[in-house]
Image (spheres, rainbow, N blue to C red):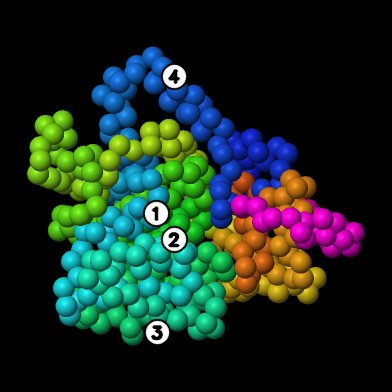
Amino acid sequence: MSDPLLAFRAEFPILEETVYLISNSLGAMPRAAETALADYARTWRTRGVRAWADGWWGMSLDVGDEIAPLIGAVPGSIAMLPSVTAAQAVVLSALEYRPPRDRILLIEGEFPSVAYVYEGLAGRLGARVEVVPSPGGDGLAADEERIAAAIDERTAVVCLSHVLFKSAYLLDLAPILLRAREAGAIVVVDGYQSVGTVPVDVSAQRIPVLVGGVLKWLCGGPGAAFLYVDPELASRLRPALTGWFAHKRPFAFEDAMDPLDGAGRFLLGTPSIPSLYAAREGPRILRAAGMPAVREKSLRQTDRLMRLADERGMRVASPRLPSRRGGTVSIDFPNSLEVSRELNDRDVCVDYRPGVGIRLSPHFYTRDDELDRAFEEIDAIRTAGSWRRWADRPAVVT
């Protein structure tokens, strides 16, 4: 089968030697990112402090404009921040929680860092956090009707992941967004596990707030997350968590805050400029590849992974229905943690999460034969028992 997306494969050097099935955790580095980081070093070396006026000062919004076309956002509506945790905290700080509208809804299965910041800040801001349980009580799926029914006139914020990180369950946002609009609540969508592998259109879907990062499917490296706020909503928000980059006249060094218009008002202090240099390159490639083609390939390859798992009697924790599946397939079997560590040692990059096992995440640059290779390696590891050498070793980060 001809695969035009493989034309982009040469842009990612790690693919020359590694079966890379971990883009749900850290996307492969584009060759252009290395060049961009060298350009950052050269600019700092030759221009020094003048680099701020040359372009560094505006990069937090300029890089946001590189991402905007991927999510159907208008230019100037995305601010770059150091992490999704920071972006969530900025949004939380921009809202008021006055009774009776002092309720924040989360869903079971959220990435822990998001829950930490909501639960940590809510009480201090005068809000109450409630968690909508998942159907199985395991955080691997969601009941959209139940979530929508939990939204009422007491609800200030609904925070939910578009794709759940363990199982890759893809939520249907439409009924939740509709109910939130009716009740006057603001929905904050975490698109970290969707943007770059699942088409997202904030304008067409009428998403008020979307947070995400370039670390994973957008292949932009760590240290750069993005915050989209609908322009009309942004004009009504004033974050308490802020910094001098969000001021209209930062070099006037005024005591009082006078926030920028648009996405700029959600900026913080001095950004990580190297991260912004690296962050641009992956989204540019994804734009060239085209999200419809990326999604079509993702569904085909994740379906192939499930068939390979089924042939071996492995438990598949990810949704079977294509319309409910993100870009990852989670498979589990005895000693899957140790097998995952042996796979990484053999240059087959995967990761492991408790409760779902090994997560396999092909991307637009993945060949079909690499999926077969991953399972062949799993078979060899289990047959030879080579996973045992990892049984008593401390866990590693993946």
| Picture residue at 87% right of the left edge, 61% below the top | 385
254 relative to 287 in the view: left or right: left
State the mark number for residue 11: none
**Disc 3/disc 1 C-alpha distance (Å):** 26 Å
The kind of secondary structure element at disc 4 is: helix
| Picture residue at 23% right of the left edge, 48% below the top | 242
Q: Residue furthest top?
A: 46
Sequence order check, earlier mark of 3 and 2? 2
From which residue to which does the magenta span run?
373-398
Q: Are marks 2 and 1 in contact (CB under 8 Å)?
A: yes
Residue tagged by mark 2?
A: 113
Sequence order check, earlier mark of 4 and 1? 4
Crowding around mark 4 (Cα neighbors within 10 Å: few <14, some 14 to 19, many 20+) is few
The kind of secondary structure element at disc 2 is: helix
322 relative to 350 in the view: left or right: left
Amino acid at the residue labelled 2: Ser
Crowding around mark 3 (Cα neighbors within 10 Å: few <14, some 14 to 19, many 20+) is some
Residue tagged by mark 1?
A: 84
**Disc 2/disc 1 C-alpha distance (Å):** 9 Å
Please indicate, yes or no, whether residue 342 appears anywhere in the rendered image.
Answer: yes
How far across and how far down the image is residue 8, in percent?
59, 40
State the mark number for residue 42: 4
How far across and how far down the image is residue 309, in percent?
74, 68
Sequence order check, earlier mark of 4 and 2? 4
**Disc 4/disc 3 C-alpha distance (Å):** 54 Å
Residue tagged by mark 3?
A: 146
**Disc 4/disc 1 C-alpha distance (Å):** 29 Å
**Disc 3/disc 2 C-alpha distance (Å):** 23 Å
The kind of secondary structure element at disc 1 is: helix
